[in-house]
Amino acid sequence: GAVVSQHPSWVICKSGTSVKIECRSLDFQATTMFWYRQFPKQSLMLMATSNEGSKATYEQGVEKDKFLINHASLTLSTLTVTSAHPEDSSFYICSATRQGTDTQYFGPGTRLTVL
Amino acid sequence: LAKTTQPISMDSYEGQEVNITCSHNNIATNDYITWYQQFPSQGPRFIIQGYKTKVTNEVASLFIPADRKSSTLSLPRVSLSDTAVYYCLVGDAKGYSTLTFGKGTMLLVSP
């Protein structure tokens, strides 16, 4: 299979704090990882694309200084929401593509609530 | 980016076959068609992917006509647990970041 995990599955934090979300490919090496955000009753919106060892590519309108992405290895990417505010509350989902294929496999998502 | 259009919602009953059609008039030569299923508060789950004609796996079939301007996801004998949102995506096999999620189709399966 192609299993992608995320940690934590949910997090509640105070406004102004930073939150780190981990995305791991458990049984394969991921050449590329993606981060999406999904608001209630809406579709997924791609935030950024990251390749191991290089800087992430952010979609238009996504602040790279606010959403820090680190893709340190072929199995781990992290998304840090810096100085979180209530409007950052959302469902954050990562995905990964296996080397040699183009199919994205998604993690279970992380529910972020900023108070 | 090739835009996709799907019905907002569909209703079905247990045991029926469900066909969800997606339009992608601007599909490019290198684009593949991929379908995902998403339950509330979960990440999307890969269902099936194809380029042309017909693809079948253990959960679904994907029908793609010769002009590739549309595709149909076929779910045989649906059950209550198939109630979910289904997304059709079109993307370049070499440019993963071009995948754009549309609004999807909310399938409701009733007893």
Image (cartoon, grey):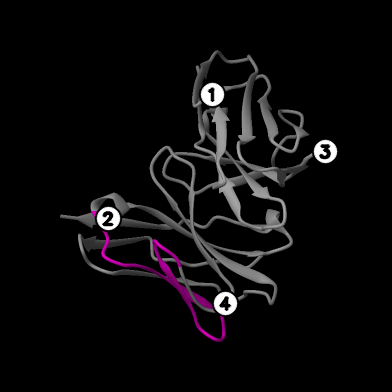
Would you name the residue on which mark 1 appears? A8
The mark lying in front, picked from 1 and 4, is: 1
Q: In the drawing, does residue A65 fall left or right of residue B61?
A: right
Would you name the residue on which mark 3 appears? A55
Q: In the drawing, does residue B105 fall left or right of residue B16?
A: right
Q: Amino acid at mark 2?
A: Leu
Residue for point 20% across, 60% down:
B14
Q: In the drawing, does residue A39 fall left or right of residue B75?
A: right
Q: Amino acid at mark 1?
A: Pro
Name the image quarter holding residue B17. bottom left
Q: Amino acid at mark 3?
A: Lys
Residue for point 54% across, 39% down:
A107
What span is colored magenta in the figure?
B57-79
Q: Earlier in the sequence, mark 2 or mark 4?
A: 4
Question: The disc numbered 3 marks a residue on which chain?
Answer: A
Q: Are marks 1 and 2 on the same chain?
A: no
Helix, strand or loop at mark 4: loop
Q: Amino acid at mark 4?
A: Asn
Helix, strand or loop at mark 1: loop
Would you name the residue on which mark 2 appears? B108
Q: Is residue A106 magenta?
A: no
Helix, strand or loop at mark 2: strand
Q: Earlier in the sequence, mark 1 or mark 3?
A: 1
Would you name the residue on which mark 4 appears? B25
> Residue B63, how many percent across, how many down?
46, 76
Question: The disc numbered 4 marks a residue on which chain?
Answer: B
Q: Are marks 1 and 4 on the same chain?
A: no
Residue for point 57% across, 48% down:
A105
**Residue density around tag 2, few if under 14, some if 14–19, many if 20 or more, within 10 Å:** some
The residue lying furthest to the right in this view is: A54
